[in-house]
Amino acid sequence: MTETFYEVMRRQGITRRSFLKFCSLTAASLGLGPTFAPQIAHAMETKPRIPVLWLHGLECTCCSESFIRSAHPLAKDVILSMISLDYDDTIMAAAGQQAEAIIEETIEKYDGNYILACEGNPPLNQEGMSCIIGGRPYLEQLKHAADHCKAIISWGSCASWGCVQAARPNPTQATPIHKVPGLAPKPIIKVPGCPPIAEVMTAVITYILTFERFPELDRQGRPKMFYSQRIHDKCYRRPHFDAGQFVEHFDDEGARKGYCLYKVGCKGPTTYNACSTVRWTGGLSFPIQSGHGCFGCSEDGFWDKGSFYDRLTDIHGFGIEADADKIGGTAAAVVGVAAAAHAGVSAIKRARQKGGEN
Amino acid sequence: MSADVASSHSEEAVYVYQAPVRLWHWANAGSILVLAITGYFIGSPPPAVGGEASASFLFGWIRYLHFAAAYILIIGFVFRVYWAFVGNTHARQIFLPPVWRGSFWKELFHELTWYAMIAKEPLKYSGHNPLATLTMHVMFVWGIVFMICTGLALYGEGAGMGSWQYDLFSSWIIPLFGQSQDVHSWHHLGMWLIVCFAIVHIYAAVREDIMSRQSIMSSMFSGWRTFRDGRPADDGH
């Protein structure tokens, strides 16, 4: 039988005290009450580790990079021991044939019981030839692994929405996991972000292991506990927003004083993520705190919404790229000028008629 | 279009806009003005104010005015829809343009020729002419419905999950448009649609008041439509 999390942790030299601290921290980061800490501890002591296949499609590995930097749920050793990460080509020791063989082994051994964690997405054009893993298109590997898994985690914006490789014009037709045609209908949890916050990733896994189900998801399949509020709602610069104190340029007095970055294109008001509460690098900082606006990396299609430094979306289909203000302002000006011209002509016509009547 | 002036039809004034409709019209116009101005500033904020953040609440006030005016507009619109059911026939005209009638399109074409300065004189209506009816229906009624829905969806984002605005609007409208920023952009475009409508609406009202065969501007104050000639109206009222 597979070892429990607790056994693995103890074997790795983690004290019971550290283990319990980890359980309460995890309970807190999941938004659960203190009474849940013993539940998490109990689950970790008794449940076998759930095998995870971590597959990489078109991606940049920023999700993995973020994941291994998780600070609370402890360090990378612990979290990598909690799950039985059977396959992850980036961080596994095995390589080549040996590594690829593990996928088949896991699929056979844990048929219907493992979690499929997808980092990146498959390109559909040219039968998936733009992403080859071990000599076969990633698309095939993904479908095969999805057929036998219990559930799918879509790590990051690539797997959740498409991200940069799916940005216009998307030549390889990179497609997010939930839109891949012919994929087995397994439950999918999206953890968007480029990358997602490390603690969010580990917390999602912890929740799934502890309760053997997904946390509550919103309509778009994201865990509510981390994606139910906008960056803006919990931003520490919000008082400057309400006061009307904005950074106008990145080198002005407002920027030095830490004013709101709304006017230099901060996407905080339209981005659902936990950056302003959980923050990054062990709670050290997050983009807005470092003086740069949020550019909405966890939102669908954020590459295609125009400049990162502008709050209005570019609207395509007008020949040139234009935003709502340019299109609307032009339309209003045209209507205004037309009305004025029409009024002029009407006045002349009326004057002529009156002239005729006299 | 009967030239039968000798018929018994000899009205000079018709009561068209009932008091609640007039009251709604002006409250609605006022809130649209406030909404457009504050909305524009929410999209493109005025220059930053100095001092301590705790000392001012400028942007907060702009947003507050926007939300307050929005609620006045929404409640007014809901009332206006209710009044379309219980009010007089004129009260439901902009909600139900008779597009299934051939005469509607024929008269609409005539109205277009009048605006193109081809027709010598317009037809005479106690209610709205067909062109006005259609413009108000498409640009105003559906424009406002669009703005109310997208507006409440955006408001629901701030009100948060569990609020009725979020559950009824944000939860499905935001995924429908793609993401929050798209809803913002479309809400912005909707504002410009309403601005275009307002320009056309005010211009047409002034022009018709001067050049048509019935009163326009004063009717929205008094409720009464007066006529400039004794011939019967073309919409049979």
Image: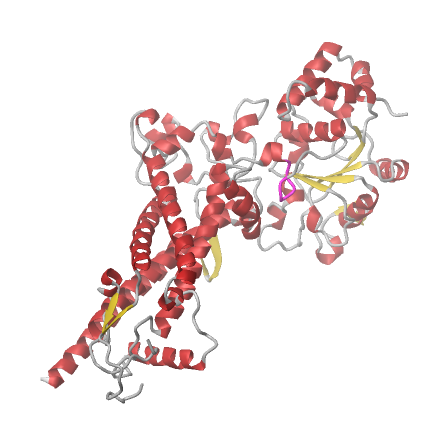
The answer to whether residue A313 is visible is no
- Judge left or right: residue A18 versus residue A193: right
- Residue B187, above or below B119: above
Figure check: B5 above or below A261:
below
Q: Position of residue A214 (x, y in %)?
A: 71, 35
**Left or right of A25, for residue A336:** left
Residue depicted at x 77% and y 48%: A185
Residue B106 in which image quadrant = bottom left
Please name the predominant secondary structure of the magenta segment in the image.
loop
Q: Residue at x 63, y 55 (%)?
A: A171
User: Would residue A288 appear left or right of A90 to someone viewing this image?
Assistant: left
Q: Please name whichever residue, B166 or A164, is drawn nearer the observer in this view of the structure.
A: B166
Q: Quadrant of residue B7?
A: bottom left
Find the residue positioned furthest to the left. Answer: A358
- Quarter of the figure that contains the N terminus of chain A: top right
Whether residue A101 is visible, yes or no, is yes
Q: Is residue B55 above or below residue B136?
A: above
* Percent x, y of residue A358: 9, 84
**Closer to us: B96 or A90:** B96
Which residue range is magenta in the image? A218-223
Left/right of residue A47 with respect to residue B186 in the rendered view? right
Q: In the image, residue A78 lies at what x, y percent?
A: 74, 21
Of B68 and A216, nearer the camera is B68
Instruction: Please say if B74 is above or below B125.
Output: above
Residue at 33% in and 29% down? A253
Q: Is residue A220 magenta?
A: yes
Q: Position of residue A128 (x, y in %)?
A: 74, 53
Identity of the residue drawn at 75% across and 18% down:
A41
The coloring applied to the image is secondary structure
Is residue A142 in the magenta section? no
